[in-house]
């Protein structure tokens, strides 16, 4: 029936346009009765499709009105029927005839005046606080298969995003509004999003690593300050963990920038300045550590700049990697502040998985105060106060899980089962990376200054070390290290290895960026 087709297509359209509070008024009693009739729903699949649309996670009310109450829909349906070849049209305001009908109804105390946008042939009127549907018995079906297919593709994508949001945004036990403007949900530690991952259905929660973390040392003791991130005293209750609330926009942005980190997207220019620990025969890498100064480089909307340490194994087609550090990425986070971040990627049966922070299931949060994806409020100043954090990415030699430890806090871990080829790492490193749209100037990296032997000028990692299979930490000798900068005219990196003094086994890196070339 034409009414059922119009109702389904109208629901699909407004869902795709983002409306979630909808009233549908129909003057066809038979249609409403059919939706409640199981036998008819099996006989007409379109009725089952409508029923499904009603329960997908929005507020929708389907109401019957008398035909004489539906004069506006009747007029618009006839207007649509007189427009051959037009699937549907948007009107900035109601036609004069419809305004007259609304005015008549209001004068008769018959209905309230609704206004703003009218869609005919699949008809709706957008209200000030809700969406008001008008459907008519005399809608004329038209050949709209291509447009409907496009809407259904959009709907499918939208439904998948809604499904993922429900998995990520669990029912909170407590809600915290941070001074940086984030909404943090305190979730039962056993009900956090990671456990919805298919590979973690029977995962046993590990509340602390089986190894003991080591305490870091500061190089410039008289000018070092701790950065402000995490919830502080206003942390989540015992037995719960903080998860930054995710929006649909966060998911969309997160999916589109995964390739920024990974590896070689053709639409971006990616630049590195880093110190890499080379594969050494007889040594397997099971962790990486260092104390990183934190900056807030100036970055445009579609650019990013970060400082990180990472572990990596496998070829380009079978890449398994974890990265931890700080990042400025307006596209990913919605602003130009500095954020604590993680990134992971793996390949299972040639299918690549992974994401930033907790935009997908994977990372298991343990700490109730410091959370991944949080704002770092205070950052270093060139030649002035330095704010730093000591970060370890260490594999538990019993469970094989990869733990993220920041300033001696066990923040959480990446379960070993997530990775197809990361029982140990063949490569690890420290340094910076920038991304910018192809052919555009690169943003700064680190402090925006080239290394000049002054640790208060350029971004640094101090007292770097690697972890072997015994869980012991060792400083890398000069022969184990390779310094790499892809654009020396824009960035630099320098390693201070086997030497005397406080700077040994440390590196400084960064630069102003600019016109770096491809």
Image: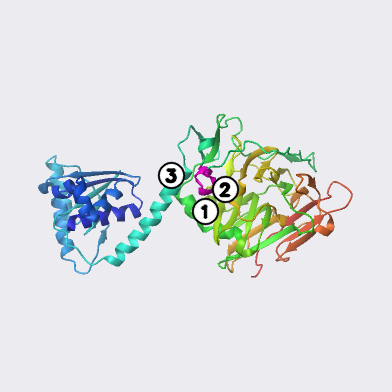
Camera-nearest residue between 412 and 438: 412
Give the image's coloring scheme: rainbow
Q: Is residue 142 one of those drawn in magenta?
A: no
Q: Residues within 10 Å of mark 1 (few under 14, many from 20)?
A: many
Q: Residue 217 sits in which quadrant?
A: top right
Q: Earlier in the sequence, mark 3 or mark 1?
A: 3
Q: Earlier in the sequence, mark 3 or mark 2?
A: 3
- Mark 3 or mark 1: which is in front? 3
Q: Which residue is mark 3?
A: 166
Q: Residues within 10 Å of mark 3 (few under 14, many from 20)?
A: some
Secondary structure character of the magenta stretch overall: helix
Residue 116 appears in the rendering: no
Q: What stretch of residues is rendered in magenta?
A: 193-201
Give coordinates of residue 472: x percent, y percent.
78, 44
Q: Which residue is mark 2?
A: 357
User: In the image, is residue 76 above or below residue 486?
Assistant: above
Could you tell me how far apart the alpha carbons at marks 3 and 1 are, in whole angstroms? 16 Å
- Mark 3 or mark 2: which is in front? 3
Camera-nearest residue between 159 and 440: 159
Q: Which residue is mark 1?
A: 254
Marks 3 and 2 in Cβ contact (< 8 Å): no
Q: Residue 497 sits in which quadrant?
A: bottom right
User: In the image, is residue 3 above or below residue 25?
Assistant: below
Give coordinates of residue 144: x percent, y percent.
26, 65
């Amino acid at each position: 029936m034409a009414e059922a087709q119009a109702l389904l297509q109208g629901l699909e359209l407004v869902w795709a346009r983002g409306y979630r509070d909808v009233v549908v008024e129909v003057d066809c009693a038979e249609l409403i009765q059919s939706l409640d009739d199981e036998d008819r729903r099996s006989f007409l699949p379109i009725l089952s499709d409508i029923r499904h649309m009603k329960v997908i996670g929005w507020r929708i009310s389907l109401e019957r009105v008398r035909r004489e109450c539906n004069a506006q829909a009747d007029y618009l349906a006839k207007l649509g029927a007189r427009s051959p070849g037009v699937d549907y049209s948007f009107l900035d305001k109601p036609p004069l005839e419809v305004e007259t009908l609304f005015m008549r109804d209001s004068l008769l105390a018959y209905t309230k005046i609704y206004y703003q946008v009218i869609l005919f042939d699949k008809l709706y009127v957008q209200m000030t606080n809700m969406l008001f549907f008008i459907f008519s018995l005399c809608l004329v079906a038209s050949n709209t298969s291509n447009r409907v297919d496009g809407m259904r593709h959009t709907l499918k994508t939208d439904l998948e995003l809604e499904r993922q949001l429900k998995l990520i945004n669990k029912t909170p036990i407590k809600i915290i509004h941070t001074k940086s403007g984030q909404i943090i949900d305190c979730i039962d530690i056993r009900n956090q999003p990671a456990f919805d991952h298919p590979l973690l259905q029977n995962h046993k929660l590990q509340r602390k690593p089986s190894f003991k973390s080591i305490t870091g040392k500061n190089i410039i003791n008289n000018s070092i300050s701790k950065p402000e991130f995490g919830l502080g005293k206003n942390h989540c209750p015992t037995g719960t963990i903080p998860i930054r609330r995710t929006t649909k926009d966060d998911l969309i942005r997160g999916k589109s920038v995964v390739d920024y980190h990974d590896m070689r997207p053709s639409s971006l220019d990616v630049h590195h300045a880093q110190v890499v620990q080379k594969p050494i025969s007889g040594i397997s890498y099971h962790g990486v550590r260092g104390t990183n100064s934190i900056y807030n480089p100036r970055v445009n909307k579609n650019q990013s700049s970060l400082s990180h340490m990472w572990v990596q194994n496998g070829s380009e087609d079978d890449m398994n990697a974890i990265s931890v550090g700080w990042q400025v990425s307006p596209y990913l986070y919605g602003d130009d502040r500095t954020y604590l971040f993680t990134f992971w990627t793996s390949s299972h049966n040639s299918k690549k998985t992974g994401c930033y922070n907790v935009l997908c299931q994977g990372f298991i949060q343990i700490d109730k105060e410091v959370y991944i994806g949080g704002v770092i409020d205070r950052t270093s100043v060139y030649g002035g106060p330095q704010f730093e954090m000591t970060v370890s990415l260490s594999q538990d030699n019993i469970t094989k899980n990869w733990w993220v430890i920041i300033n001696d806090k066990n923040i959480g871990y990446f379960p070993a089962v997530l990775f197809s080829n990361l029982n140990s790492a063949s490569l690890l490193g420290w340094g910076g990376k920038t991304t910018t749209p192809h052919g555009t100037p690169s943003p700064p990296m680190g402090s925006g200054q080239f290394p000049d032997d002054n640790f208060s000028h350029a971004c640094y990692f101090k007292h770097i070390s690697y972890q072997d299979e015994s869980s012991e930490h060792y400083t890398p000798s000069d022969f184990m290290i390779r310094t790499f900068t892809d654009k020396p005219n824009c960035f630099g990196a320098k390693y201070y290895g086997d030497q005397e003094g406080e700077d040994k086994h440390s590196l400084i890196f960064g630069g102003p960026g600019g016109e770096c070339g491809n």
